[in-house]
């Protein structure tokens, strides 16, 4: 009846087609649609992120090995986990943080400091670090009290 009705794939008989489709066919169809609709950079971002977790994962590359860093937050804390296989280098590490960045100096193989941006503002005190099972875990307490200042707007 309408000339554009042929452009829409969800018609009355399309529900029967979906019922008889193989799940792998549906997955490949959805991948094809997303690849046509989204730019390449957005696809790479979607492939890197796990949709079930609220975490940021990055890999910092040194000359010899890749340093894997995972940052995630809970209701009250921010956790940073770094995979360090050599336990002897833990004594030489120096860990600093600002209100929104974590700085780690003294990682073997890295001439530069490891700088990780935190997902929220953290407190100055209350940070702790543990090394267990080849993983350095740093816990930073979130800053809960954000002070607002009202600014008066006057007409000129």
Image (tube, rainbow, N blue to C red):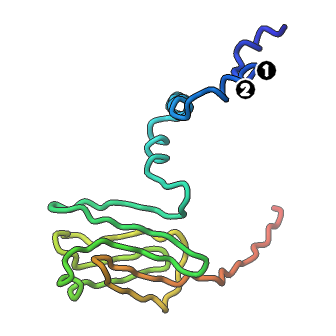
Nearest the camera: 113 or 140?
140
Residue drawn where x is 40% and y is 67% of the image: 70
Residue 12, label in figure: 1
Q: CA distance from mark 2 to mark 1?
A: 7 Å
Q: In which image quadrant can residue 129 be found?
A: bottom left
Percent across and percent down for residue 103 are 35, 76
Q: Outermost residue toward the front?
A: 20
> Which image quadrant is residue 2 in?
top right
Q: Residue at x 72, y 78 (%)?
A: 149
In the rendered view, tell whether residue 131 sits above or below residue 115.
Answer: below
Place of residue 120 in the rendered image (x, y in percent of width and height, measured from the top left)? 55, 72
- Point out residue 84 in the picture as x, y percentages from the top left corner: 26, 74
Q: Which residue is mark 2?
A: 15
For the point 59% across and 27% down, which residue is it? 21
Residue at image point 30% right, 71% down: 83
Q: State the count of labels.
A: 2
Q: Secondary structure at mark 1?
A: loop
Q: Are marks 2 and 1 in contact (CB under 8 Å)?
A: yes
Residue 8, above or below 103: above
Q: Is residue 42 left or right of residue 96?
A: right
Instruction: Decide: is 60 above or below 94.
Output: above
Q: Is residue 113 visible?
A: yes
Q: Nearer the viewer, residue 21 or 128?
A: 21
Q: Secondary structure at mark 2?
A: helix
Question: Taking 154 as reference, is 132 left or right?
Answer: left
State the mark number for residue 127.
Answer: none
Left or right of 55? Residue 131 is left
Q: Can residue 37 be seen in this snapshot?
A: no
Residue 41 in which image quadrant: top left
Disc 1 packing (10 Å; few <14; some 14–19; many ≥20): few
């Amino acid at each position: 009846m309408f000339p554009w009705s042929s452009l829409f794939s969800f018609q009355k008989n399309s529900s029967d087609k979906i019922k008889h489709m193989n799940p792998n066919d549906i997955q490949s169809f959805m991948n094809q649609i997303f690849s046509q609709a989204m730019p390449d950079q957005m696809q790479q971002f979607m492939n890197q992120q796990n949709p079930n977790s609220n975490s940021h994962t990055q890999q910092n590359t040194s000359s010899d090995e890749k340093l894997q860093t995972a940052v995630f937050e809970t209701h009250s804390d921010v956790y940073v986990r770094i995979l360090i296989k050599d336990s002897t280098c833990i004594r030489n590490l120096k860990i600093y943080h600002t209100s929104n960045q974590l700085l780690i100096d003294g990682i073997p193989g890295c001439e530069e400091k490891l700088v990780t941006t935190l997902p929220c503002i953290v407190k100055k005190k209350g940070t702790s670090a543990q090394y267990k099972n080849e993983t350095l875990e740093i816990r930073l307490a979130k800053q809960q009290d954000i002070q607002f200042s009202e600014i008066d707007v006057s007409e000129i």
